[in-house]
Each structure stands twice: as structure tokens, then as C-alpha cells.
């Protein structure tokens, strides 16, 4: 069973100290070491990009979690890593979006899994500006929205001014 504490601790360990996941299988044309290096470099770029998109409050929350995680006994760290490792890769990567969005990634993923590159940064800014209640409501809306309508919903979200977002979410949740 996934716990937010485990995910936050492991997110902190991943972002602050490097990736601990097993590398993806290597194509036959590469040596194992080349494949490991390629995956590690890609993961580092992904973590760095995710870190830069977080606001200072979320970064501090991750730093605090990293400190708390480092102070845990090794067997407890191992237990948290094992719990995190049981998540599928998509949910693990969802945690790179920060503690607030990462905790709700399973609910938000239908809306956010396939975002065009040019929409990614503006959408992440919107998500990071939303509070937990708004994100939870958006997650419920995302799951109820048929797949063929999710792109339109995402674009609509991106066009709603921040001051009107709560009212828009309430209106859309009543549809």
C-alpha cells in the first residue's frame, strides 16, 4: 500500500541524492554499462528539470524530507525504498512533480499523462499554484472525463484565469 510519507521520503532521496531505481533494460546493441549510463543521465536531466519547476516551498519540503530520511535507520530507509519501488514507473515519475501534485498523481494522471511539450511548463505552473482541494477536485473531474474530451478539458483549465479557477472547477464538477 502506497503511503504519502514513503513517497515523499523516496522522492527526497531520489532528487537530493540520485536515482536508486534499477535501470531499464538495455537494447542489445549497447553494453550494459552504456545503457546504465544513458538511463542515469536521462534520469538526472528529468530530476533536474522537475526540481527547477518547483517553487521554493516545495523544494524546502523536499529538503526537509531528505534530512528526515537520511536520519532514519538503514532498515527503515530500505523499507521505504521498497514501498516506493512497488509503484509503477508512471506513479514514481508523478512524484517528480513535487509533493503536492505527486500525492495526487494517480487521480491526475488521466489528464496529465500525455501533454504536448509546449503545454507542459504552463500546465505545471497552474498545478503548482492550485491548492490541495483544487487538485483533488481536478483529479475527480479527470477520471470522470472521457479520454477523447481530456485534451479539451486541459486546454480549458489552462485558459481559466487563476482568480476564476475555483469557480470553474466547481462548475465543471457539476457537469
Image: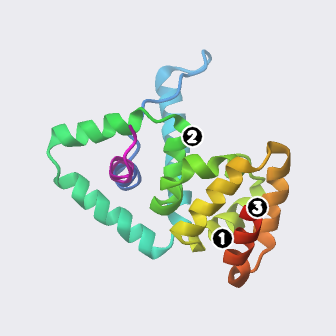
Q: Which residue is mark 1?
A: 126
- Comparing 174 with 34, the one in front is 174
| Label 1 vs label 3, nearer the camera | 1
Q: Disc 1 on helix, strand or loop?
A: helix
CA separation in Å, label 2 and label 3: 19 Å
Residue corresponding to mark 3: 119
| Quadrant assignment, res 15 | bottom left
Lower position in the chain sequence, tag 2 or tag 3 = 2
Query: Is residue 61 positioned above or below 82 on the image?
Result: below
User: What secondary structure is found at the residue carrying circle 2?
Assistant: helix
In the rendered image, the residue lying farthest to the top is 28
Residue, far bottom: 163
Q: Residue furthest left?
A: 73
The residue sitting at 23% across, 42% down in the picture is 77
Camera sees residue 45: no
Q: Position of residue 127 (x, y in %)?
A: 62, 66
Q: Where is the N terminus found, in terms of image quarters?
A: top left
> In this picture, is 81 found above or below 56?
above
Q: Which residues are magenta?
A: 1-10
SS category of the residue bearing label 3? helix
Q: Which residue is mark 2?
A: 90
Mark found first going from the N terminus, 2 or 1? 2
**Is-magenta flag for residue 8?**
yes
CA–CA distance between discs 2 and 1? 20 Å
> In terms of depth relative to the viewer, which is nearer, 13 or 156?
156
Judge by depth and name the residue closer to the eye, 76 or 24: 76
Inspect the magenta stretch and tell me whether residue 167 lies in it: no
Amino acid at each position: 500500500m502506497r503511503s504519502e510519507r514513503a513517497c515523499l521520503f523516496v522522492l527526497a532521496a531520489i532528487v537530493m541524492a540520485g536515482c536508486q531505481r534499477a535501470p531499464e533494460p538495455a537494447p542489445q546493441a549497447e553494453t550494459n554499462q552504456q545503457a546504465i549510463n544513458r538511463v542515469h543521465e536521462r534520469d538526472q536531466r528529468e530530476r533536474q528539470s522537475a526540481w527547477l519547476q518547483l517553487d521554493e516551498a516545495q523544494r524546502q519540503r523536499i529538503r526537509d524530507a531528505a534530512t528526515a530520511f537520511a536520519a532514519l535507520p538503514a532498515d527503515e530507509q530500505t523499507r521505504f525504498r521498497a514501498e516506493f519501488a512497488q509503484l509503477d514507473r508512471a506513479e514514481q515519475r508523478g512524484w517528480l512533480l513535487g509533493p503536492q501534485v505527486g500525492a495526487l498523481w494517480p487521480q491526475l494522471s488521466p489528464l496529465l499523462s500525455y501533454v504536448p511539450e509546449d503545454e507542459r511548463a504552463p500546465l505545471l505552473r497552474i498545478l503548482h499554484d492550485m491548492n490541495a482541494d483544487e487538485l483533488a477536485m481536478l483529479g475527480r473531474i479527470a477520471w470522470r472525463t472521457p479520454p477523447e474530451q481530456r485534451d479539451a478539458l486541459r486546454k480549458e483549465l489552462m485558459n481559466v484565469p487563476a482568480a476564476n479557477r475555483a469557480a470553474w472547477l466547481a462548475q465543471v464538477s457539476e457537469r
